[in-house]
Amino acid sequence: MVRAALVLPIMVLLLGCNSPAAKTGARNVPPPPQNFQVHMTPEGLRLDWEKAPGATHYTVFWGNESQDYRNITNFKAPPVVLAGLRKGKLYALAVTSWNERGESDYSTEQVLVYDDNPKNASVYAATGNNLMEKGSYDEALVYFSAAIRLDPHDVSAYQQRALLYERVNRTDLAKRDHAMAQKILKTRPLTRKETVFLDRPIPRDQLR
């Protein structure tokens, strides 16, 4: 009788360990993908993220406005490349993970201008400035960042983005961009446009 009493709890324990409820991936939907990143490549936008625990596949969403996704496609695992996108367009992207229980929430959204031509940097800086003056700060930030990505030495783009950060109370980021602008200015002569955001008058012989 004693041995029979011991066998029953052991069998219950073993059955519990093998039940679907005990399997982490089967009880809940997977978490959203983390560390979602978008990179420019000659073939298109390269998307990468950390694999979600228990996920069996992923859905990538994208569109031309933030949180307004008009296109989706499924992938087995990262990284993936979205090809056939239009240069010069703004794209907002996010990704979800799936398993047999369903779909996760969206990952952190990534928004960028798809372009790899450095000649367009000044165009995007001007677009960002117009959007900032209209109060469209989120979209303006995307265009300033595009200008800086295409021309990392564009002082005015750093200065304008710093001004935007000041308007949205991100003084830490504003200081970083001001510091970068000053660092670039130390390596070459100033243009008249670049003096707009400086606190001190610039000697005439330093202007070009």
Image (cartoon, rainbow, N blue to C red):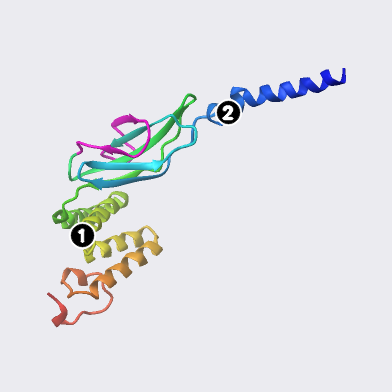
- Percent of width and height locating residue 199: 28, 75
Furthest residue toward right: 1
Proximity of marks 2 and 1: CB atoms separated by less than 8 Å:
no
Please determine whether, in this image, residue 101 is positioned above or below residue 167: above
Residue 177 occupies quadrant? bottom left
* Residue occupying image coordinates x 20% and y 79%: 202
Q: Nearer the viewer, residue 101 or 160?
A: 101
Q: Which residues are magenta?
A: 64-85
SS at mark 2? Answer: loop
- Percent of width and height locating residue 34: 43, 43
Inspect the image, locate mark 1, and give the three-letter code of the amino acid beneath it: Asp
- Percent of width and height locating residue 170: 39, 60
Residue 68 drawn in magenta: yes
The residue that label 2 is drawn on is 23
Whether residue 26 is visible:
yes
Furthest residue toward left: 208
